[in-house]
Image: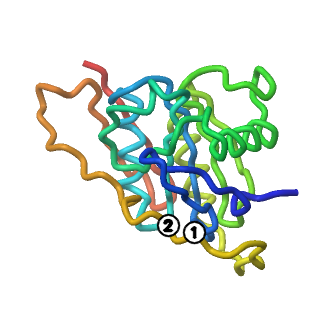
Amino acid sequence: MPDLYEFIIRDSEGRDWEMWHLHGRVVMFTMLPGPGPAPQTQGLDQLVVMFAADGLEVVGVPADEAAAVGHEVAFTVSSSAESSGTAALVSWLLDELPGPFGTRVAQGYTKFLIGRDGRPVARFEATADAKSLIRAVRDALGAAVPPAPPRSRPTVAPPSALLPVPLPPRRPEDDIVEAEIVAESSTEIVLVARVR
């Protein structure tokens, strides 16, 4: 059975990105249905801010070429789900984590969580409860990093431009969704969103 590390996808600039370089990290792939920023991408940026230092990698996967433009986010955006390497990865995710409509992505912002061992953990639809998603991310980050499996091919260096894009300065008048993270205890985080 394949794992994440067998795939090579492309970043949004068309450079090869070997998933092998994500070994030991918890990875969340999220489908991006359209171009440009959206309230949902702000929530993903919050996840990056909260958990990147603990080993979370968020990767946006645009549905098509039109959806691949205009994303100024704190996470990496891949080439579209229509491109060959990314299409193979998306097909694997859908097979491993079918949703309410089987192996189809029912709507944008469907998220696929991959554990530190490169195996699928959970699928979250766009309407999923934020607390459940955060709890699953925390649980996956709590797992030990397994030994690296043997390589089946020579390494491909990761593109140097895969560093997260800095977030633009926030202006309160531009906010659509304001989120606060409230720690209820040392083991639970609640995401409270207020829509203006």
Residue drawn 63% across and 74% down? 155
Quadrant the N terminus occupies: bottom right
Q: Residue at x 79, y 29 (%)?
A: 103
Identity, as a three-letter code, of the amino acid under mark 2: Pro
Residue, disc 2:
158
Q: Measured along the vertical axis of the image, is residue 110 above or below residue 45? A: above
Q: Quadrant of the C terminus?
A: top left
Looking at marks 1 and 2 on the same chain, the residue that comes earlier in the sequence is marked by 1
Query: Label for residue 21?
Result: 1
| Left or right: residue 105 compared with residue 25 | right
In the image shown, does 123 or 184 lie closer to the viewer? 123
Asked where in the image residue 81 lies, by quadrant, the reply is top right
Measured as percent of width and height from the top left, residue 148 is found at 70, 78
Kindly identify the amino acid type of the residue bearing the numbered disc 1.
His
Q: Residue at x 37, y 35 (%)?
A: 192
Percent from the top left, x then y, of residue 30? 54, 39
Q: Secondary structure at mark 2?
A: loop
Q: Secondary structure at mark 1?
A: helix
* Image location of residue 146, percent across then percent down: 70, 76
> Quick check: 57 above or below 111?
below
Looking at the image, residue 150 sits to the left or right of residue 157; the answer is right
Q: What's the CA distance linking mark 1 and mark 2?
A: 7 Å
